[in-house]
Image (cartoon, rainbow, N blue to C red):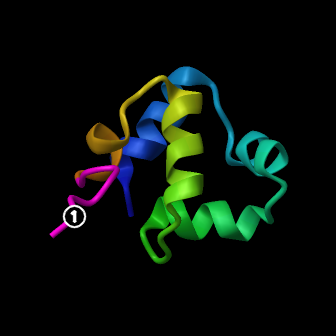
């Protein structure tokens, strides 16, 4: 579970339901992303943007992978 994301959501007053509505995805999808059970760069980016945080700071990995 990504406590950093959950904490930021509480501090910023952003709910998972708001993110679901904005992205037109099911609440379960966002829950799986936040809990770390599923990955989606698109949804992770949207969460970071909604929280005013960088992708890297929330998910502890680069937003874009470097080409080999």
Question: Can you give x and y, in whole percent of width and height, for residue 32 in the image?
Answer: 57, 70
Please identify the quadrant where the N terminus is shown: bottom left
Q: Residue furthest bottom?
A: 37
Mostly what secondary structure, the magenta segment? loop
Please identify the quadrant where the C terminus is shown: bottom left
Q: Does 64 sit left or right of 7 as displayed?
A: left
Q: Residue furthest front?
A: 68
In the displayed structure, 42 sits above or below 53; it is below
In the picture of the structure, the residue carrying the numbered disc 1 is: 67
Q: Is residue 63 magenta?
A: yes
Q: Does 2 sit left or right of 61 as displayed?
A: right
Q: Does 2 sit left or right of 34 as displayed?
A: left
* Number of residues whose C-alpha sits closer than 10 Å to that of mark 1, classed few (under 14), some (14–19) or many (20 or more): few
In the displayed structure, 10 sits above or below 5; it is above
The residue positioned 57% from the left and 55% from the top of the image is 42
The magenta stretch spans which residues?
A: 61-68
The residue positioned 21% from the left and 58% from the top of the image is 66
Depth order, front residue of 49/9: 49
Q: Does 1 sit left or right of 12 as displayed?
A: left
- Determine the secondary structure under disc 1: loop
Depth order, front residue of 50/13: 50
Question: Can you give x and y, in whole percent of width and height, for residue 67 in the image?
Answer: 21, 64
How many numbered marks are there?
A: 1
In the displayed structure, 12 sits above or below 45; it is above
Q: Quadrant of residue 15?
A: top right
The residue positioned 55% from the left and 42% from the top of the image is 47
Q: Is residue 37 magenta?
A: no
Question: Can you give x and y, in whole percent of width and height, for residue 37 in the image?
Answer: 46, 77
Question: Can you give x and y, in whole percent of width and height, for residue 57 in the image?
Answer: 27, 38
């Amino acid at each position: 579970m990504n406590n950093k994301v959950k904490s930021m959501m509480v501090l910023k007053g952003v709910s998972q339901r708001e993110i679901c509505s904005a992205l037109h995805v099911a609440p379960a999808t966002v829950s799986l992303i936040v809990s770390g059970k599923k990955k989606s760069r698109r949804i992770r980016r949207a969460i970071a943007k909604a929280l005013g945080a960088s992708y890297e700071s929330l998910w502890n990995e680069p937003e874009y992978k470097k080409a080999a």
